[in-house]
Amino acid sequence: MTPEPAAERRPTAHTAHRVRVRAVYPGSFDPFTPGHLNVVNRARGLFDEVVVLVAVNGRKHPGTDEEERAAAVRAILPVEWTSVSVAAWSGLTSTYCRRHDVGVIVRGVRNTSDLQAEYQLAGMNQSLGVPTVFLPTRPELAAVSSTAVRALGK
């Protein structure tokens, strides 16, 4: 997976005195796809720090645990992306955000079905004090899902 360059963040009169913003990009990432990499790349152009949060989802049953999936994500991320880190987590994303001083959740959306489901989660997270930013998937990556990648691997 070769990522495209992120938009470079340059200080401006409006940003010179602003508060640093940490974002979290949660998901089961089973596996981490080119679409996920694209979302991380774009998020790092918007926020000071991005945490790829490899989470446990009780409705999904991945082939590996969250620590192994986090290690796989670390192996894919370019080393020069120093503002991006990876963490494994088994609780609510909003709890992680409060405990680790994260100000925003990033979610990629491929289509209107994704947006509808994500919008409901965003409302819950907003009520818990953490806003969500949606990043639409690039059209050429919209058909790529972890489920499809797993199916191809069988």
Image: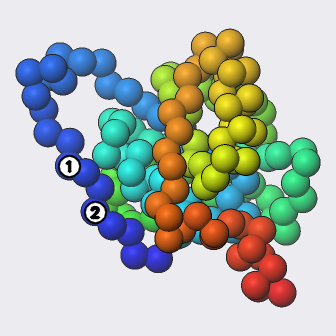
Classed neighbour count for the residue bearing mark 2: other residues with Cα under 10 Å, few (<14), some (14–19), many (≥20): few
* Up/down of 51 relative to 7, above or below: above
Residue 8: which disc? 1
Name the residue: 71% across, 76% down: 149
Look at the image and tell me in which quarter the C terminus lies: bottom right
Instruction: Give the residue at the far front of this rendering.
Output: 112
Left or right of 10: which side holds 29? right
Q: Which residue is mark 2?
A: 5
Task: Please name the residue shown 63% across and 69% down the image.
Answer: 143
Q: Give coordinates of residue 63: x percent, y percent.
A: 85, 68
In the rendered structure, which amino acid carries the disc numbered 2?
Pro
The secondary element bearing badge 2 is classed as: loop
Q: Is residue 74 visible?
A: no
The vertical placement of 70 against 63, above or below, is: above
CB atoms at circles 2 and 1 under 8 Å apart?
yes
Q: Amino acid at mark 1?
A: Glu
Question: Spatial distance from mark 2 to mark 1, Cα to Cα?
Answer: 8 Å
- The foreground one among 132 and 95 is 132
* Nearer-the-camera pick, 87 or 5: 5
